[in-house]
Amino acid sequence: MHPKLSQLVFDASENKEDEECSDVPILKVESECLEKVVEFLKHYEQEPLKEIKSPLEDNTFEGVVKQEWYRNFVQEVDSPMLFDLVTAANFMAIQPLLDLACLKVSCLLMGKSSEEIRIILNIPQMTPQEEEHARREHRWIFDD
Amino acid sequence: MVFNINPRTMSATNNINIDSVSLFDDDDSLNKICFDFDDPKGKSWCTSSDNSSCCSLCRLPNDVDEDARDFEHGDDDADSLSDLEALETLNDLVSFSTSAAAPRQAAPLSMAQANPNNNTFAASMMSTSDQVSLPLKRQACYCSSSSAMMMPSLFNTCAECQSTSPTLPNRSTYFTQFASKNSSFLTRHHHSCTQLSPAFPPSSVPAPPDFLTAGFLPEDPVYSILTFLDVRSLTTLRLVNTKLRSMASDNNAGWKHHCAALWSRKVRVCDDARRLFDQANAAEDDAAGRRASNGWRSSAMEAYKTSILEAESVNEITEDDLCFDLATDRSGVKWSFRFKESAGLDWTSWDPWWKNGPARKLVFLRDGSILQAHPPGRSTIVTTHNGTPLYDVFSERLVQRNGVDIIPPRIEMRWRFVESSMDLPSRPDGAYVRITVGGRDVPTYVVRRSPNGNWGFIMESCWGLYASFELASREDATSSLGVGRRALRRTRNGSRWVNVDDENNVEDTEEDNIGRRNVRRRVNLFVEESAMTVTGVSQWREALLYNIGAVTLPEGNHASSQFDAAWQNALLLR
């Protein structure tokens, strides 16, 4: 596994005075999530993920991520694990995993209504007055 | 009903202004949450089946004294409190705690009238606006005393006795002891029961925190997510809640990329939008300094919005939009010009566009003159602006007399704005441009946005067309969608690609033909006369006056009526 892919691990290993002990504690990442991160890193060593550029060339996840293994990697996880992966990738500073997980989240949100987004993200309702106020602010984009 | 509570003033309003309405375990939030109850007989309080960490109401703050945590499940004795006493106790608790936090006097508490249908529970962390909302669920809690009245309480119904208990502390003993030790404590209760009242559905269990906005994710990955979204998704996200509205409006949400992508397809973007975009760029370089000004964080989004709104609402041009010599070191628009077929062969015969070449390039100068840039053939330079040589219009023409080519006299062209035109409705300033050719007014040019959606302007009369962008040549416009490319379409019954102009394909159905006609209509927008909006019919008065030799065309609001009167007289005399 490429230690330099995670900036956190790389920095921690660089700072270790005791060269015999190569363990780096990752305290803020759950073990189940960390397993997925390790799985990603191991595969990345064999097949690096192609850079995901913004703005996207395609509106679909499959259109942007052409590599099948990476597509399947995020398709298999549920929403809580997906957000855990985002957190873990951010914490461990693994940019390719962060890009991939963030892209998947974006694709989940793309084209959805505000109500559907609330369901996906588990966010409580706004009041009708709040939503009406917000819609009035954006009439320029919603009036076709 | 959800109330918005300002913990400093303790004033409650019905307006919601929350940054985050989801629940999460955070001791800081516990210290900041206040409650406002406006109805002593109201029945709003927390519901929970678990006192571990279901919500901030059910969980004791860490700094609560151990003694204060324990008080017995009360029964019907002298320690039980009446409704009013309970309310007064709560008032005292909140007043004491808020007075420690802020010197302002807290508003008196009252019981909130909860929406009985509201099964959601949310207690939000203090946002920068210090607004908190707390929708509370109705809960029955009976005191086992003689009173059968519903007693307002913050606690669950006791599963043991079903008639609950004095869940509020004895004022005389507890309050004095506790308040002196725990000034930040707002309220507390003791859960001796772990079962909800059977009258309320188990779905009242508080939901887990939301994934995005409640501090679950740091800002950087959230912005990474937002940068992948398209514009419509970003604006939809702003409808979700206040926190997302703020983040989705931020420059870091990818709005600069959206601006660049949109504007790359447009020939003109208004100055206000560009100024906002520059502000967003400058803000990155000087984040600390600009943070003091309002709106800098969302200036890229405002730039995007402003550009679209301006393109949709502004259909008239200014001198800045029209002129080439705006400043000595700055060059403006070069207008593409061609005659319409209705102008006649005398004009179209030596129009380069009608010979399948590029359209003539004319420039409007601030002194009211019109000159030509890059004329085909031989011409004499009249002036130079910002390194661009400018020539008399039509100066490359050659006229033959007795078999000898001669250079015809110079044709001076001038321009001015007119307020209204004889044949056309009233519009704001900048809608009509009158051009004089060789000292004679020609029919007015009507300004409008380009119908191909590139935000450019066109000026059109019954005989000529100006465009503020490169006009497709006649050959390109009739044969393809772009220079060097052909327009193709699929046949209906298979996967074959055929040329758009191919009308002999036996596999085509009527629907295919309609599709082809639609494609042709879009491509030929500036070729076919039927695509034009200003014709000899709509400008017949001005065209007629020009043709009978008028030097100056009337203008103003009464021009049409004066012409009509003169026309009627002429007919009568005839």
Image (cartoon, rainbow, N blue to C red):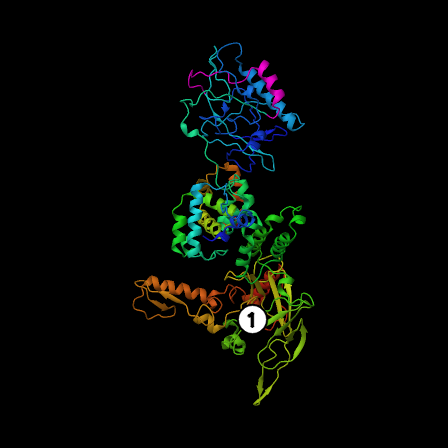
> Residue B561 at what x, y percent from top left?
59, 60
**In the rendered image, the vertical position of residue A47 relative to residue B183, given as above or below:** below
The one nearer the camera, A136 or B277, is B277
Given the image, on which type of amino acid does mark 1 rest?
Phe
Q: Does the magenta segment cover residue B303?
A: no
Residue B157: quadrant of the picture: top left
**Residue B206 placement, left or right of B386:** left
Give the crowd class for mark 1: few <14, some 14-19, many >=20 residues within 10 Å. Answer: many
In this view, the residue farthest toward the bottom is B403
Residue A15 visible to an observer of this rendering: yes
Report the predominant secondary structure element of the magenta stretch.
Answer: loop
Can residue B423 be spotted in the picture? no
Q: How many marks?
A: 1
B526 or B165, nearer to the observer: B165
Relative to B351, is A144 above or below?
above
In the visual, does B356 lie left or right of B94?
Answer: left
- The quadrant in which residue B169 appears is top right
Viewer-side residue, B372 vs B329: B329
x, y percent for residue B541 = 56, 66
Which sits in the foreground, B365 or A84?
A84
- Could you say where residue B372 lies in the image, as x and y percent from the top left? 61, 74
Q: Chain of mark 1?
A: B
- Horizontal and vertical percent position of residue B261: 52, 58
Circle 1 sits on which residue? B337
Residue at point 56%, 47% (across, down): A17
Report the span colored magenta: B157-184
Q: Which SS class for mark 1?
A: strand
